[in-house]
Amino acid sequence: MRMSTCKGCGKQLEKNEKMTYSSKTYCKECYDEKIRNKEEYDDTVKRIHDYFNLGILNTLILKQIKDYVEDYGYTYSGIIYCLWYITEIRKVKLEVKYGIAMVKYEYENAKRYFMEQNRIQNSVDKIENHKINVIHRECKINRVDKRSNILFDLDAI
């Protein structure tokens, strides 16, 4: 009996182990990775579509997405976060003719901003999780009769 080979990791698969995606055979782990990748890609395309209000994305933007993921090692969620950073924090208006070219220039800045926000949030969480002990002390104040110190003999004056 001939065994199949996973196109992702090269593992030998028995008949009950193989799963098919795009006419290719994968093991369970690689198949799940392909499905997750496809869902992330579809979500990225949908969200970029919302930024530009286009019916369909042009080939420039689709190529930019592909290049950024394959050549630069960017993640789909990183691209979306970077677009949010560009439009909401930097207040830059994206133009269709340039596509998402700003991502290439602002990805590292967005990443630093994200890391700083996480650091701040973690420090706030530490403070909120810290128990604050409040000690109430009772202080007794000895009141001195002020009249006794200020007695004047009016007849002597």
Image (cartoon, rainbow, N blue to C red):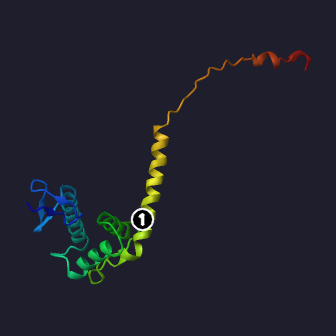
Q: Is residue 90 visible?
A: no
Q: Which of 148 and 70 is in front in this view?
A: 70
Secondary structure under tag 1 reads helix
The quadrant of the rendering that contains the C terminus is top right
Residue hosting label 1: 111
Q: Which residue is drawn at 16% across and 76% down?
A: 56
Q: Nearer the viewer, residue 46 or 144?
A: 46
Using the rendered view, name the quadrant where residue 75 is placed.
bottom left
Using the rendered view, name the quadrant where residue 48 is placed.
bottom left
Position of residue 144 measured from the top left corner of the image (x, y, whole percent): 75, 17
Q: Nearer the viewer, residue 75 or 52?
A: 75
Position of residue 120 relative to residue 70, above or below, is: above
Residue projecting furthest to the bottom? 97
Residue projecting furthest to the right? 156
Q: Which residue is drawn at 87% across and 16% down?
A: 153
Tally of numbered tags? 1
Position of residue 17 relative to residue 80, above or below, is: above
Q: Which residue is drawn at 44% across and 69% down?
A: 109
- Left or right of 44? Residue 145 is right
Q: Which residue is drawn at 27% across and 74% down?
A: 65
The quadrant of the rendering that contains the N terminus is bottom left
Q: Can residue 117 be seen in this view?
A: yes
Three-letter code, disc 1: Lys
Position of residue 117 measured from the top left corner of the image (x, y, whole percent): 44, 56
Position of residue 90 measured from the top left corner of the image (x, y, whole percent): 41, 70
Position of residue 36 relative to residue 121, above or below, is: below
Using the rendered view, name the quadrant where residue 40 is placed.
bottom left
Residue projecting furthest to the front? 1
Q: Nearer the viewer, residue 148 or 92?
A: 92
* Classed neighbour count for the residue bearing mark 1: other residues with Cα under 10 Å, few (<14), some (14–19), many (≥20): some
Position of residue 82 measured from the top left corner of the image (x, y, whole percent): 36, 68
